[in-house]
Image (cartoon, rainbow, N blue to C red):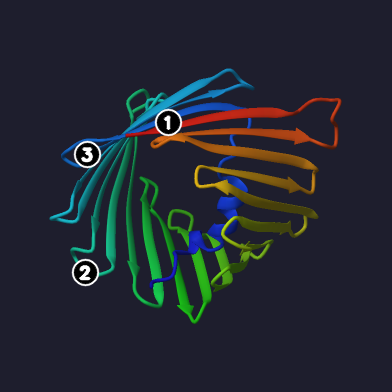
Amino acid sequence: MAPPKSDDLGQEAKDLINKNFHFGTIKVEGKTKAKNGGEFVTDGTHNTDTGSITGGLETKFKYEEYGVTFTEKWNTDNLISTSISIDDKIAKGLKLDFDTTFKPNSGKKTAKVKSAFKHDYIHTTTDVDFDFAGPTVHGSGVFGYKGWLAGYQASYDTANSKLTANNVSLAYSDGDFVIHSGINDASKYVGSIHHKVNDKVSAAASLSWQSGANATSLTVGGKYTLDGDTFIKAKLDNQLRLGVSYVQSLRPGVQMTMSSLVNAKSLEQGGHKLGLSLNLEA
């Protein structure tokens, strides 16, 4: 099996610590699928801190015979995005994406060409952001062998002839646990570990340190599956912010998530948040 791409190294810990927590928001998302294979996603989010309401619509059509996927998105910021993807047709393991965005209010346009190639021991990506001043090129590669994963990611701004990202990472996976570490731009050091203790319990920890700023961040989290329809998650960081999430499948295609954030450093001063999410799928 091909290794993950560079951005997805350590994804197990990221998902456990970040997913299913919707602090300070009320979110509703609906997914439907037509008989011809077309997929439609509609979502709306209310930010309880600012009172703002945002929404979006996504349509996706797959033409499996040709390996082509056409996706179009629109949101309440009046941003229109279009993506055409060709997967496994030009060459085995090769995927090409052509992405564009357009903002009618300002007339601003962007375009990006992305490519990814994966094989048994390697996963590479090359993306080009087109700009009138000069394109920015992003590249990454991950090599995997016997559970070990070594990755490198870089970005180069051709307009300013400058390397804007220079990241290296190393990970090891062995069945029920994954360890990941990385250095970003020779100044930020990150690491994470994810352990699936058993079928019901998983735990993760994430650490980052910024050189020169003396800024350290540590977050630990856990997930406990109550039954096939319910699980709970909790996380705590070094600022004593405690997050708890309760996820319940009310019926097939209906999932509700309730989450809360408690600032244990200043219980009396506030700063606590609640969140609610409802996912509908048909």
> Amino acid under label 1?
Glu
- Residue at 50%, 65% in the rendered image: 153
* Disc 2 secondary structure class: loop
The x, y position of residue 170, in whole percent, is 58, 72
- Residue at 57%, 71% in the rendered image: 171
> Amino acid under label 2?
Ala
> Amino acid under label 3?
Gly
Bin the neighbour count of mark 3 within 10 Å (Cα to Cα): few under 14, some 14-19, many 20 and up: some
Bin the neighbour count of mark 2 within 10 Å (Cα to Cα): few under 14, some 14-19, many 20 and up: few
Question: What residue occupies the far bottom of the structure in this picture?
Answer: 146
Q: Which mark is residue 29?
A: 1
The x, y position of residue 134, in whole percent, is 39, 51
Determine the CA span between mark 2 and mark 3: 25 Å
Cβ atoms under marks 2 and 1 closer than 8 Å: no
* Disc 1 secondary structure class: strand
- Residue at 75%, 34% in the rendered image: 262
Residue 59 sits in quarter: top left
Q: Which mark is residue 91?
A: 2
Determine the CA span between mark 2 and mark 1: 35 Å
Bin the neighbour count of mark 1 within 10 Å (Cα to Cα): few under 14, some 14-19, many 20 and up: some
Taking the image as shown, residue 238 lies to the left or right of residue 275, namely right
